Amino acid sequence: MISRKIPTYTFNYENTTSSVYHVEPGEGLPEHEHVFAHLTYCVSGRCAIRKENLYLEIDKNHEPILLKAMQWHSIEAIESNTIFINVFPKAEM
């Protein structure tokens, strides 16, 4: 079970809102969905991304992942000192 974390930082830039999460193993965002799409990427440590029929482990060398609108997904840290960022359209936050 993933322990839900709130963003460490949230900021707006032009037409986007970015939420930065500093998390430890087992922490992140449990299964959920949105009415809008967003990107997620890992800048430190490792994350597990689960969505529909996909399980993917990402780190700083992996391209950002598009999480489509109305597609359930979860994001979980699987390594200590993990940092991931979600980028949303500003109007959707």
Image (cartoon, rainbow, N blue to C red):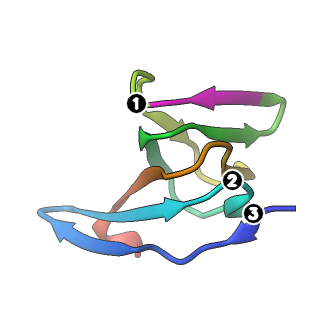
Give, as a single range, the part of the protein colored magenta: 55-59
Measure how far apart labels 2 and 1 are at the Cα level. Answer: 16 Å
Residue 90 point in image, percent of width and height:
29, 68
Q: What secondary structure is marked by label 1?
A: loop
Which of the pair 83/66 is nearer the observer? 83
**Helix, strand, or loop for circle 2?**
loop
Magenta segment's dominant SS is strand
The amino acid pointed to by label 3 is Pro
Q: Could you tell me if residue 32 is visible in this image?
A: no
Image position of 52 with respect to 29: above or below: above
- Residue tagged 2: 25
Mark 2 vs mark 1: in front: 2
Q: Secondary structure at mark 3?
A: strand
**Residue at x 40%, y 30% (from the top left corner):** 60
Label 3, residues with CA under 10 Å away: few <14, some 14-19, many ≥20? some
Q: Could you tell which of marks 3 and 1 lies nearer the N-terminus?
A: 3
